[in-house]
Amino acid sequence: MKQLAAETIRLVSSSQVITSVVSVVKELLENSLDANATNVDVKLENYGFDKIEIRDNGDGIKAADVPVAAVKHYTSKISSSEDLEKLATYGFRGEALGSICSMSEVLITTKTASDDFSTQYLLDRSGHVTSQKPSHLGQGTTVTVLKLFKNLPVRKQFYSTDKKRKEEIKKIQKLLMAYGIIKPELRITFTHNKTIMWQKTRVSDHKMAFMAVVGTAVMSGMVPFQHHSEDPEVFLSGFLPKPSSDGCLTSHSSAERSFIFVNNRPVHQKEILKLVQQYYNLKSHKDSNRSHPAFFINIAVPPSAVDVNLTPDKSQVFLHNKSF
Ligand code: ADP
Ligand code: MG
């Protein structure tokens, strides 16, 4: 793992990655996926404010890398900003673990294939290791985040209502569903206060993964699509409601089952969301409460044609050539 050069840091750094419980879950989950995990367990206690724990069966962190893993701008994923042109990982800023440490108490337990046993590390606010001890977990990494936002009462205050807290759980569930769709081979469990909120087994392809999320009934109203254009190079694929489908079945009152990805990254692409919505609302049902069709669109473009560095959570991207 290396520290990014000051010039690269200026280009990629973002002052606010961790703003909510869902942003912690997103960053930790993406780290697990970047480490080739096929199994991820997400556990929250008290909506994540007491505890957020993400356990993966990925590559683990080498003992020599642990001391810098949570120090800002250390990353194993890029060496310079030019690497963004061929980016194949979710992470690249080397900021998430450091930011999480500054807002909570963090424990990392990790074991690589060549370690004999796992080690649990306690980190301080600046991301430095303060103590370590042997532990008993298998290969992979478990990040435990305790007392999030304890030192940021205003941010915590934002979640003081039951409604806000429940919305956050919904958002986390939708986020996990998105990664579950785009990574069919991934097994995920999501637990809140010992109750299983959602889970997905490992499946063979995107169709089975999308079905695992929306259910077989909704899936029966869907049709697969594919579109390839050469110049600019764009490959579109996914599932949309059949034009004849029953809107009561394939549409929802919110975008809770609308999934858009650019190069496997879940994104909020309002224009596409609107486009699909308008198309189906013109065509089919009249029920205005259900104006959000369930769909899944994966947009694959060369990594050099997309700027993932627009927003801190990378949930909006800039496509260099939109006219496809
Ligand atoms: P980034 O993901 O941008 O590199 P992070 O702060 O999220 O920055 O993580 C820092 C580094 O810690 C990563 O580059 C990676 O090497 C290591 N790391 C973090 N989480 C995991 C994990 N679950 N498994 C393996 N390595 C991890
Ligand atoms: Mg990361």
Image (cartoon, rainbow, N blue to C red):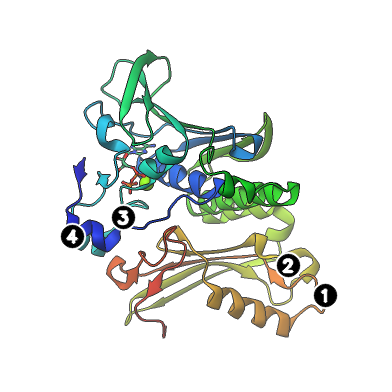
Q: CA distance from mark 1 to mark 2?
A: 9 Å
| Quadrant of residue 141 within the rendered picture | top left
Residue designated by label 4: 7
Q: Which mark is residue 251?
A: 2
Residue designated by label 1: 287
| Lower sequence index among marks 1 and 2 | 2
Image spot of residue 257 (x, y percent) = 65, 60
At x 80% / y 67%, what residue is drawn?
A: 248
Element at label 2:
strand
- Amino acid at circle 3: Ala
Asked if residue 167 lies left or right of residue 134, the reply is: right
The quarter in which the C terminus is drawn is bottom left
At x 26% / y 35%, what residue is drawn?
A: 68
Asked if residue 88 lies left or right of residue 228, the reply is: left
Q: CA distance from mark 3 to mark 2?
A: 33 Å
Residue designated by label 3: 88
Which one is closest to the eye, mark 2 or mark 4? 4
Q: Are marks 1 and 2 in contact (CB under 8 Å)?
A: yes
